[in-house]
Amino acid sequence: MQIVQQVVFVLVFAVAVYFFYRNVSKIRRNILLGRDEDRTDNKSERLRTMFKVAFGQSKMGTRPIAAILHFFVYVGFILINIEVLEIIVDGIAGTHRAFAPIGKLYDVAIGFFEVLALLVLVGCALFLTRRFINRIPRFHKPEMKGWPTKDATIILVTEIVLMIAILKMNAADQVLQARGAEHYAQAGSFPISQFLVPFFEGFSTETLVVFERIFWWFHIIGILLFLNFLPYSKHFHIILAFPNTYYSNLKPKGQFDNIGSITNEVKTMMGMPDADPNAPPPESFGAKDIQDLTWKNIMDSYTCTECGRCTSECPANQTGKLLSPRKIMMDTRDRAEEIGKRIDSGLEPNDDKNLLSYISKEELWACTSCNACAEVCPVNIDPLNIITQLRQYLVMEKAEAPNELNMMFTNVENNGAPWQFPASDRDKWTSEL
């Protein structure tokens, strides 16, 4: 019977890993649809940024309540997965509590994991309360209707159920250990699940073994299903937060890169020695679709946690404008997914739509370029970079700038400044002094 369980476990585990690998490969493919961009410089600074922002959660502290709850869930869920590693070893080898021989350290670890499991459970329950009872405004913006809210709810409820399952498994295990049941050696410390023991003491040993196995299988299958849900969920940031912060923009916020082709053309016109008169003309300016963005822009979209901090800090959104930086990232990810599905279906990547079919001009021109969204993002996402590239396309390819900007462009061209009077008249205001 034991060998049958081992075979079933290995098959279930292998299938779960295969589907996870396949789905992650598709996301990687979608990210690499973007233009190449070199972000391999300054490795030490990038590592410091990753450990500070992703591991250290340094940007979460601006909102203390959310930071504390997220810390419980983040640390708890990561460390509890060490116990999941033991379950995997037990499932493959047919053992029970394979790490128990390490002795007192094992007791301390299991006790610590139980406390963390309780904190995860409480944290998720409070997150649900904040979302559906306190109704924090950033969770109820227009872009959060439908799947985004369901996604968050599924994850939070799943984590609560998984934590309950592991505590019930440990409670049944304790009773079996106390009865000296075969295969259940004395091991572990259970400061939380001990309070569930009275519920199980009235059952026979055979029934308790069934309960313990049900909870064991439920927990590990739940973890594997959770793993395969991640690629379809905003919670894929659990994985991508680390590479995304490593490849953060290390330049000062607000610094724009010159478009090389335009810079070269100006230098050629001015007869500057470092110009290249034989340089090929640019194929396009700015970004019209996913392929025009960089791979880092697309990685940003897949890393977005949909927490809404960017939108709640956005001055345009606060004043009733249509712009929501979170929606910009969600739309970018949706468009990448749409192109990826076309590729999977054997169709041409390009269709009659583009990224501007998702993001309106009104949204783009509402942006003040203040960088509040990039500053507040807990995983260093940069929505402004995408907005800027889409604006460049509208202005330089489509000549579709707002009238106010067209007037400014004309004044700069004619007068060398954004104002409507020539340079020779700029000091006339001093005549009245």
Image (spheres, grey):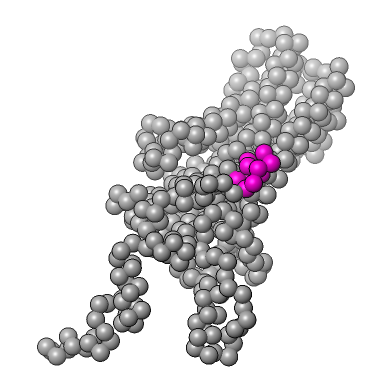
Q: Say whether residue 313 is visible.
A: no
Q: Write the residue at 28% across / 86% down.
A: 423
Q: Foreground: 307 or 56?
A: 307
The percent coordinates of residue 399 (x first, y second) are 41, 64
Determine the residue located farthest toward the right in the rendered image.
3
Is 410 placed above or below 350 here?
A: below
Q: Is residue 160 left or right of residue 427?
A: right
Q: Write the residue at 11% across / 88% down.
A: 432
Tell me, yes or no, whether the highlighted magenta stretch contains residue 280: no
What are the residue bounds of the magenta stretch?
339-349
Q: Foreground: 106 or 157?
A: 157
Q: Foreground: 405 or 51?
A: 405
Is 300 placed above or below 65 here?
A: below
Is 81 placed above or below 294 here?
A: above
Quarter residue 43 falls in: bottom right
Q: Say whether residue 25 is visible.
A: yes
Q: Is residue 69 left or right of residue 229?
A: left
Q: Quadrant of the C terminus?
A: bottom left
Q: Write the residue at 32% across / 72% down.
A: 408
Q: Write the residue at 63% across / 19% down.
A: 197
Determine the residue located farthest toward the left in the rendered image.
432
Tell me, yes or no, whether the highlighted magenta stretch contains residue 348: yes
Quarter residue 234 falls in: top right
Q: How many marks?
A: 0
The percent coordinates of residue 363 (x first, y second) are 38, 52
Q: Quadrant of the N terminus?
A: top right
The percent coordinates of residue 409 (x first, y second) are 35, 73
The percent coordinates of residue 417 (x first, y second) are 32, 80
